Image (cartoon, grey):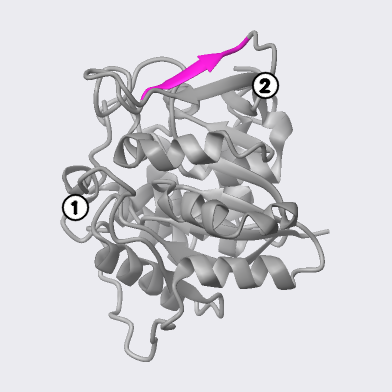
Amino acid sequence: MTIPLIIDTDPGIDDAAAISLALNHPQLDVKMITTVNGNVNIDKTTANALKLKQFFNSSVPVFKGASRPLISNPVDAAEVHGESGMDGYDFKSPTDETISPMNAIEAMKNVLKESTSPITIVAIGPLTNIALLLATYPEIKSKIKQIVIMGGSSGRGNVTPLVEFNIYCDPEAANIVFNSQLPLVMVGLDLARQAMFSHEFIKKIKTMNQTGDMLFQLFQHYRTENVHEGIKLYDVFTILYLIDADLFNVFDANVQIELQGILTKGATVVDFDPIEPNCQVVHSPISKHYQQAFLQALAPVSYTHLTLPTNREV
């Protein structure tokens, strides 16, 4: 049985990897991709989503979303992902793609309303579009199975000492989503920091197939934290979690967004001993088996020639 998905994204190199897995995996049914201002501006994130759609010859529709946060001034992460947001691979420029005049929020509402079964939203960018959707059309909450969020941290941040980038971009939107009373899954910085992909591993994907080569080229231009130690593919773990949640340690928690602090605005305050949990936090890998899951998702048939861990020992 497939899992119907909406992917809300700001591509982004690790976004590109997550989208690649989602579009390749037979267990996942991507209904639409919506874009948001984040890693780069909305025109670039939308162009990047279209490039990926064309690369995979996909029929999944792309809709353009919010061009700025609810309140905060826009920021970007071009220093991490490159000026285009996906520097490193020579994508063909989309020539026959046109963006629907319908805004992403309207498009999400329509897909959710018309769906006969609840849909999972995978949010791997700032949460602006999702907050606007919930605030504008609260009646569609019953059509959302869960929201799987790449954002936040139970420890240190990556923009400020305590704040992760996606939440930093639009903390007010994050506050709306985390208090929506919907089933939430937070995949924060903690997981990717404990589940890196070594440079030796990344070299192996280059020869797998065209997708592996594309991702390898992008990863050479990915300037995430401590990149000399390995690659942290934050967004990828939202997809790997959906494919096999048993690969990870998951804890009930109450997560609130700090909105007032001069030095801490956007921090995710994570209580692992909550009276009333409001989400699950995917905290750490049980083993290195996530690497094999990544390859299986990338190329379900052709990955077997690579040498990988076959047990779940760390």
Above or below, 89 relative to 126: below
Asked whether residue 269 is drawn in magenta, I would say yes
Asked whether residue 41 is drawn in magenta, I would say no
- The magenta segment: 267-272
Q: Amino acid at mark 2?
A: Pro
Magenta segment main secondary structure: strand
Above or below, 210 relative to 155: below
**Quarter of the rendering containing residue 202:** top left
Position of 20 compared to 278: left or right?
left
Residue positioned most to the top? 273
Q: Residue 274: percent from the left, percent from the top?
A: 65, 12
Q: Residues within 10 Å of mark 2 (few under 14, many from 20)?
A: some
Find residue 82 and name its label. Answer: 1
Q: Residue at x 68, y 52 (%)?
A: 141
Q: Secondary structure at mark 1?
A: loop
Q: Is residue 268 visible?
A: yes
Q: Residue at x 28, y 18 (%)?
A: 261
Find residue 277 and name its label. Answer: 2
Q: Residue 310: percent from the left, percent from the top?
A: 68, 31
